[in-house]
Image (cartoon, rainbow, N blue to C red):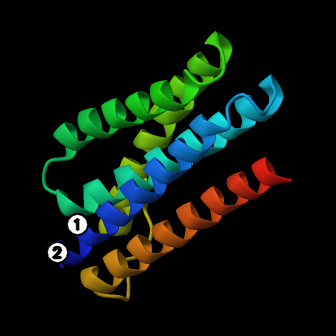
Amino acid sequence: MVIFLFLILAINCLLGFWCYRCLFQARTLFDDRFGFNAVLTSTAMISFVLALTLFFIFPDHFSAMNIINLSLGIGTGWLFGRMVNGQTLIAGVFNGGTGGMMGTMAGAVAKDPSICGLPASAFSEGMTVLFFGSAGIILLALTVALLLFALRV
């Protein structure tokens, strides 16, 4: 299961890097409004999916994963946000941190639904991880595809 999660993590990192590379190369073509929306969308989704996957890999270290995922989200937001202007940098850092924390919390609830008062999952832990990992790849791929489609039109 851990090898599958590392494969998902690698695919998500490659999708995030590809999105950054394409947006960075075309940063002179879009205005501030599109840049702001692209940064908000990309940082929130990339940090969410990476944090979710990292939490599934290391579920026993909750406080350490909170700090790591928050730092990863802020770093992602800073990287994407510096493409446009200072206002976008601040929004990117905020949305990246928020996405990182949301990914950590969604991973915790997916692993143990009883922490939110939800009934226990009828699926095994492996099936839950498989579902959320695959859904994360699909969600990130759709987000990147929509961003790059909006950039080309």
Q: Residue at x 27, y 55 (%)?
A: 55
Q: What is the three-letter code of the residue carrying label 2?
A: Ile
Q: Residue at x 60, y 38 (%)?
A: 25
How many other residues sit within 10 Å of disc 2, few (<14), some (14-19) or many (≥20)? few
Question: Residue 6: x and y, percent?
Answer: 22, 66
Q: What is the three-letter code of the residue carrying label 1?
A: Phe
Visible in this render: residue 134? Answer: yes
Visible in this render: residue 44? Answer: no
Labelled pair 1, 2 in contact (Cβ < 8 Å): yes
Q: Which residue is the site of mark 2?
A: 3
Q: Is residue 144 left or right of residue 31?
A: left
Q: Which residue is the site of mark 1?
A: 6
Q: Residue at x 38, y 52 (%)?
A: 50
Q: In terms of secondary structure, where does tag 2 sit?
A: helix
Q: Is residue 92 above or below residue 47?
A: above
Q: Is residue 114 left or right of residue 7?
A: right
Question: Residue 57: x and y, percent?
Answer: 20, 62
Q: Is residue 80 above or below residue 145?
A: above
Q: Quadrant of the N terminus?
A: bottom left
Question: Residue 29: x and y, percent?
Answer: 77, 33
Figure quadrant of residue 64: top left
